[in-house]
Amino acid sequence: MNFNAFLERIRNLLLFPAYEWKVISLEDRTAREDLYHYAFRLILPGAIAKFLGSFFYVQKQLDIDAYRFSFPLTQAVFFSIIQLLTIVVSAYFITGMARKFRSTRNYARSLKLVIYSFTPLLLMYMVANLNPILLIALLPGAYGLVLFGKGLPVLLQTIPDKQPAFIIIFLISVSGIMFLLNVFFNALTLLIFPGVMR
């Protein structure tokens, strides 16, 4: 996926999701390619924002020379890992739950569904990661639930009656996975950088 196609995919998903999900369902690109060529392109700017936000935090709040670059770099790497793991684990969860919601059980399609549904949230991280005060910028990321709902009947053939419950389960599972991963990596951060509270 070239850069222009990448930008067009973001625009179409945000503005014309019903149409774009049909386009996605007909593509022969693998879910792994979508993970590397689409999701990672969205995660990377958020990781850079995390690096910058952590860098200014170290300079202004801690002023610890030893942490000047190592702490921001670690935070950026951890952010990327958390997002990738959340996407992959959420897709496994969605695949496992599919039959209970009378949907197609297909991991590759579930992964595509999660990847593209994460678009608004990953876009908002580009702002929210610059400073903890800007976390409110993540609120528009909830539009990802709308994208997920629009994609369910196209990619997983979920019947209309089951879609609301599936969306709620998706929200709960993603929130839980992100919470657990953040707790783990925050604890790891404190082990690597004693005295750092963020």
Image (tube, grey):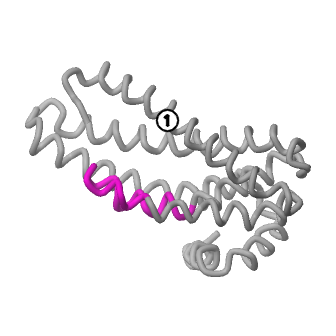
Q: Give how far across and how far down residue 8 sits, in percent.
A: 60, 79
How many numbered marks appear? 1
Q: Residue at x 8, y 37 (%)?
A: 63
Q: Give how far across and how far down residue 193 sits, in percent.
A: 25, 24
Please determine whether, in this image, residue 84 is positioned above or below residue 143.
above
Quadrant including the C terminus: top left
Q: Which residues are magenta?
A: 119-138
Please determine whether, in this image, residue 153 is positioned above or below residue 7.
above
Please determine whether, in this image, residue 149 is positioned above or below residue 106.
below
Q: Amino acid at mark 1?
A: Phe
State whether residue 44 appears in this view: yes
Name the side, left or right, on which 65 lies relative to 196.
left
Instruction: Give whichever of 86, 162 is nearer the camera.
Output: 162
Label 1 belongs to which residue? 179
**The quarter of the displayed image where residue 3 is located:** bottom right
Q: Residue at x 34, y 54 (%)?
A: 135
Q: Give how far across and how far down residue 5 sits, in percent.
A: 62, 77
**The quarter of the displayed image where residue 100 is located:** top right
Quadrant including the N terminus: bottom right
Neighbours of disc 1 within 10 Å: few (<14), some (14-19), many (20+): few
Q: Residue at x 10, y 33 (%)?
A: 65
Instruction: Give whichever of 33, 15 is nearer the camera.
Output: 15
Overall secondary structure of the magenta section = helix
Q: Give how far across and how far down residue 29 sits, in percent.
A: 77, 62
